[in-house]
Amino acid sequence: MEKAKVYFTKELTPEAVVKMYRLLGKELPGKVAVKVHSGERGNQNFLRPEFLRPMVEAVNGTIVECNTAYEGARNTAAKHKELFAEHGWTKYFAVDLLDEEGPDLVLPIPDGKVLKENQVGKHLADYDSLLVLSHFKGHPMGGYGGALKQLSIGCASSEGKSLIHSGGVTDDQTVVWSHVAEQDAFCEAMAESAGSVMEYFKGNTAFVNMMCNLSVDCDCCAVAEDPCMKDIGILSSADPVALDQACIDLIRQSTDRGRDHFLKRVESRHGTHTIDAADQIGYGTKEYELICVD
């Protein structure tokens, strides 16, 4: 597989998000789903809708999300919609909770090592293409969160999230936390489920990672650590595997005093195993050319 192109800028502005998407040279066809993280109530680090507004408007996109599989402000459609309004998303955008109603859209994973299918929000079928806007940061379970997490856990319904977290054992969110998979199997399940979404959209995808507010905790944490590193910039690619790998490499190359703390979170959860597994599956590559732009 040829090296993937990954574009990088230190500029962190709403206009730069659009610029980095445009550098990919692809127009997403038809109705565009824009996957973001809505941010758990109480979280201080999630990307605000104002920051992403020019990008969403540039593709005439619809903001999409799915409900969680754990208690909080986003585990039911009613509560999640209330939080979307509270966080300002509905002020600017049409918002679609993909799993607001069932049944789920079931995506096959015929050669899956851990999963044989992925359960995503039913409404995903209403879209022709997918733009994934990820806040790159740490994560208490996955080690880090970026494009691959948005494709996997992010697009999965509550039941699908349960299936991934349990390594294919159960899709019942009432019992999933008693059946949490061994860590490498969980990472492999994320890689496989992300691949099923890539296969579903057949190339009509694009990815932008924002490396800012670099906390070791995810935007899903109501109580999250403050950022431990200075902002790095924005990266984009048509390849989510290369994109996440490039972000990890920039963390490793950093001289920021918070670097080791961030990497401890990633490494303690075998976070890069998700990237390795995705590379092995073959819907992306870890080999990339980093193209720096002003």
Image: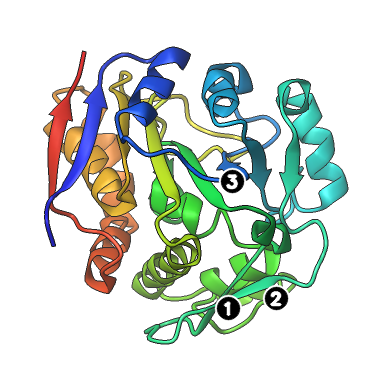
- For the residue labelled by badge 3, is the local secondary structure a helix, a strand or a loop? loop
Q: Check the picture and name the quadrant holding the C terminus.
A: top left
Task: Read off the residue under disc 3.
Answer: 30
Q: Is residue 135 left or right of residue 245?
A: right
- Identify residue type, mark 3: Gly
Closer to the camera, 264 or 54? Answer: 54
Residue at (54%, 23%) from the top-left corner?
A: 52
**Which is closer to the viewer, label 2 or label 3?**
3
- Identify residue type, mark 2: Val
Q: Position of residue 33 (x, y in %)?
A: 60, 45
**Do the residues bearing badges 2 and 1 touch, measured as CB atoms within 8 Å?**
yes
Task: Read off the residue under disc 2.
Answer: 175
Q: Position of residue 251 (x, y in %)?
A: 22, 34
User: Which is more N-terminal, label 3 or label 1?
Assistant: 3
In the displayed orientation, state which residue is furthest to the right: 78
Q: Is residue 69 visible?
A: no
- Identify residue type, mark 1: His
Mark 2: give few (<14), some (14-19) or many (20+) Cα within 10 Å.
few
Mark 1: give few (<14), some (14-19) or many (20+) Cα within 10 Å.
some
Q: Is residue 291 left or right of residue 74?
A: left
Q: Position of residue 162 (x, y in %)?
A: 62, 70
Q: Check the picture and name the quadrant holding the N terminus.
A: bottom left
Distance (Cα) linking label 2 and label 3: 39 Å
Distance (Cα) linking label 2 and label 1: 7 Å
Residue 258, by quadrant, is top left
Residue 59, by quadrant, is top right
**Do the residues bearing badges 2 and 3 touch, measured as CB atoms within 8 Å?**
no
User: Which is more N-terminal, label 3 or label 2?
Assistant: 3
- For the residue labelled by badge 2, is the local secondary structure a helix, a strand or a loop? loop
Residue at (42%, 55%) from the top-left corner?
A: 142
Distance (Cα) linking label 1 and label 3: 39 Å
